[in-house]
Image: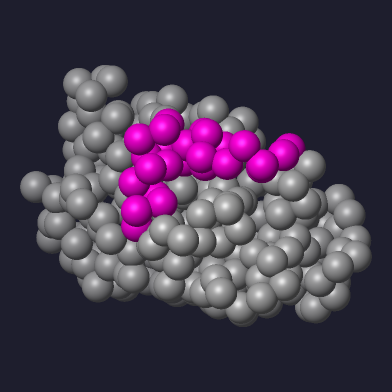
Amino acid sequence: MRYDAYIFDVDGVLIDHSNSFIPSIVLAVKTILNDDTFNQEHVFEIKSFKNFNNDWDTAIAGYCWRKFHSSENLSDYLEKVNELGSGIIGVRNTSNELTSELEEHLIRLVKESYGGTTACKKLYGFYPTTILKKGFWNNETPMVSYNKIKPFLQKLAIFTGRNKEEMELGFEILKWRIDDKMLAVSDLPELNKPNPKKLIPLIENLNCKNPLFVGDTEDDSQLVLNYVKNTGKPLDFCLIESNLSVKNYNFSCSSTLELIKKMDII
């Protein structure tokens, strides 16, 4: 099929975040647990389950597993979470000891880890007080150059789990940007992936017949399935391969650059 528009996720697709958001989650959980029993492989496993696209929810899930359910292996714990509501709702239902104050503290630590002393104030409105490092965002790099993606910018949109400020930082890293009407960021949790409500106007603005969504997580996959189910309109999913386990996709590419090379012929 020849695609006439493309909707991209950001992290793991346009920006290499393997040394930024992932270690931010790990450091936040390690800091509050005061031990080293949580690592990036655990992050990958959590994010392979639906409704864990949000890094803060992933951190809370990792903490609750190690703090309250350490006698269970992680996959069994996540299956229980899935049965009790999935995502952060399921996590809360497994752990009565989890308070809103504890959640807020974990989220703050992830923000401090990511933004650090160099960008935490700009991104989140406060200076770090616990994790006083320069911030893991400094490790982020583009996964495809501006010259490679430039020919497709007029038929490209972005749907990301980043908030507005994080996406502004992302555009600085990418060294290109798109019109705001072609961008959907994270603001209200209930509208985040895999809810397709924000995806619908993006595709309408692209004025296309055969769009392709490009992502790397289970929530990206579920987003596409939900869009097709809710609208009855076509949308294929290209999976950018990573350490995450994703079940449903139309085809996969080893990298975004590989996809870009194919975009004129698929």
216 lies above or below 103:
below
Q: Quick one: which residue is furthest to the top in this view?
A: 231
Residue lying at 14% horizontally and 50% vertically, measured from the top left = 250
Q: Is residue 93 above or below residue 133?
A: above
Q: Position of residue 138 (x, y in %)?
A: 68, 77
Looking at this view, is 32 or 172 the one in front? 32
Q: Residue furthest front?
A: 71
For the image shown, how many numbered marks are present on the structure? 0
Q: What secondary structure characterizes most of the magenta part?
A: helix
Q: Which residues are magenta?
A: 75-100
Is residue 82 magenta-colored? yes
**Which residue is at the front of the view, 207 or 143?**
143
Identify the coloring: one colour
Q: Camera-side residue: 209 or 254?
A: 254
Residue at x 66% of width, y 55% of height: 166
- Considering depth in this image, is 265 or 111 the residue closer to the camera? 111
Please indicate whether residue 248 sits to the left or right of residue 134 in the image. left
Q: Measuring 79% from the left and 42% from the top, which residue is drawn there? A: 101
- In the picture, measured across the screen, residue 78 lies left or right of residue 10, that is left
Q: Answer above or below: position of 167 versus 226.
A: below
Q: Is 230 drawn above or below residue 151 in the view shown?
A: above
User: Percent from the top left, x then y, of residue 14?
Assistant: 45, 64
Q: Can I make out residue 110 in this image?
A: yes
Q: Quadrant of the C terminus?
A: bottom left
The answer to if 125 sits in the magenta stretch is no
Q: Which x, y percent locates residue 187?
A: 63, 36
Q: Percent x, y for residue 229?
A: 23, 24
The answer to whether any part of residue 193 appears in the image is no
Tell me which residue sits at (85%, 75%) in the image.
132
